[in-house]
Image (cartoon, rainbow, N blue to C red):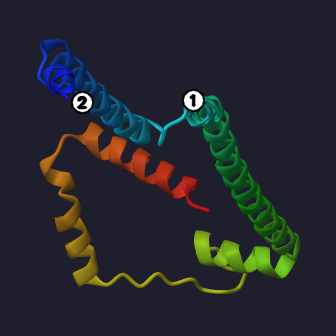
Amino acid sequence: MAVKDRDRFSTATRIRIIGEQTAARVYRSQTRRQARRSRLTGRAALLAMVFCSLVVALAYPIRQYVAQRAEIADLRREQQETRDRVEELRDLKARWQDDAYAEQQVRLRLHYVMPGETGFVVVDPDAARKARAESGGADRPWYRNVWDGVDKADAAARRP
């Protein structure tokens, strides 16, 4: 028994026991690390990388597709508006083909009268004074008045 006790308290035995305890601690810490690492495996990382690559590769074409669809919708709306305008102009042209409508418009716009009729133009004096005061034509040079008249005529011509 004395040999066993001596073995138990020898330096070599103590070093061996300390080594075994250290090895056990290292093994336990490695298993914990592996448990933490096992959440993201190589396959999962590869799958995430492939997914990100697909998202990056498809982002621009999808954006282009959406932009083109919006442009197509705008063009279709514009085309419908143009068709509606053409239809309105056809109706207006058909109305102008009617002599009664043309005569009515000439009387209304140009103040024409038929032979034997007497034409009158009633001017409201208050409205005439108000129009002169608003335009301020006397306060400006003549060429500005002419140019404003051209602008007004051009704006009237642009209206449908």
The three-letter code of the residue at mark 1 reads Gly
* Residue that sits furthest to the top in the current view: 12
- The label on residue 112 is none
Image quarter of the C terminus: bottom right
Asked if residue 7 can be seen in this view, the reply is yes
Asked whether 68 or 61 is in front, the reply is: 61
Above or below, 16 relative to 118:
above
Alpha-carbon distance for marks 1 and 2? 32 Å
Of discs 1 and 2, which sits in the foreground? 2
Above or below, 124 relative to 97:
below
Which percent across, then down, holds residue 46? 60, 29
The three-letter code of the residue at mark 2 reads Gln
**Quarter occupied by residue 126:** bottom left
**Quarter occupied by residue 28:** top left
**What residue does disc 2 label?**
21
- Image side of residue 150 versus residue 117, left or right: left
Which percent across, then down, holds residue 66? 65, 46
Asked whether 74 or 61 is in front, the reply is: 61
Image quarter of the N terminus: top left
